[in-house]
Amino acid sequence: MITVICGTNRKGSKSHLIAKHCVEQLKALTEQSVQYINLEELDLTAMNAEMYSPAGQSSQVQKWQDASMIPAEKYLFIIAEYNGSYPGALKLFIDAASIREYAGTFKGKKAGMIGVSAGRAGSLRSMDQFATVLNHVGSITFPAKLPISGIDGVLNAEGAVSDEGTSKAIESHLQAFLQF
């Protein structure tokens, strides 16, 4: 199983559109099950001091962890760049998911990253920073990271990837990730 995680809780994010595109592409490229976790759905009110004990873990995080993380062999994180780093909601989610079944959730899982930004760097800095977190929790990071820059020029009015070069880069990245 491959689980795609949209690493922002921003409503209507462009990262979500890229994540949906990747889910569709992965389903076309592999017979493996592909799951999707969209942090737009993360209830941040459940992220509080009690979340740092197994009994206090959010039922939503527990559901995602049991259904889409523990059974997964690979994760593909779609990461926006906010203020020179990755979104705080992603860090909070990783923290919450690390409380219960830590080893089964992260240890030895392969993780890839695609960065999304309006600027020119394509979220490279945030992917590098997040790779450090993934390494710390025991995941094995795919060395190729795909930065998608100038996201506003990549998507059409309906939110679909319309730039041919970006579409080909995503497909090539996903094919390599499947071989990883």
Image: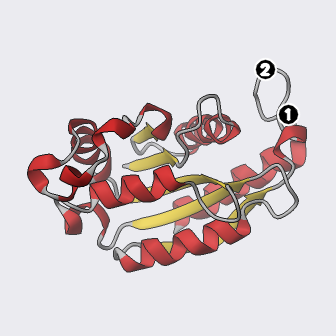
Left or right, 74 with reference to 156: left
Q: Residue at x 78, y 59 (%)?
A: 122
Residue 143 appears in the rendering: no
Q: Is residue 159 above or below residue 99?
A: above
**Contact between labelled residues 1 and 2, with CB atoms less than 8 Å apart:** no
The three-letter amino acid code for the residue at tag 2 is: Glu
Q: Residue at x 55, y 45 (%)?
A: 8
Estimate the x, y position of residue 35 in percent, counting from the top left.
41, 39
Q: Element type at marker 1?
A: loop
Asked whether 163 or 52 is in front, the reply is 52
Residue 9 appears in the rendering: yes
Q: Residue at x 19, y 47 (%)?
A: 57
- Report the residue that reaches farthest toward the left: 55
Q: Residue at x 52, y 40 (%)?
A: 9
Q: Is residue 3 above or below residue 60?
A: below
Residue 102, image quadrant: bottom left
Q: Is residue 95 above or below residue 136?
A: above
The three-letter amino acid code for the residue at tag 1 is: Ser
Q: Which residue is mark 2?
A: 158
Dot label at residue 162: 1
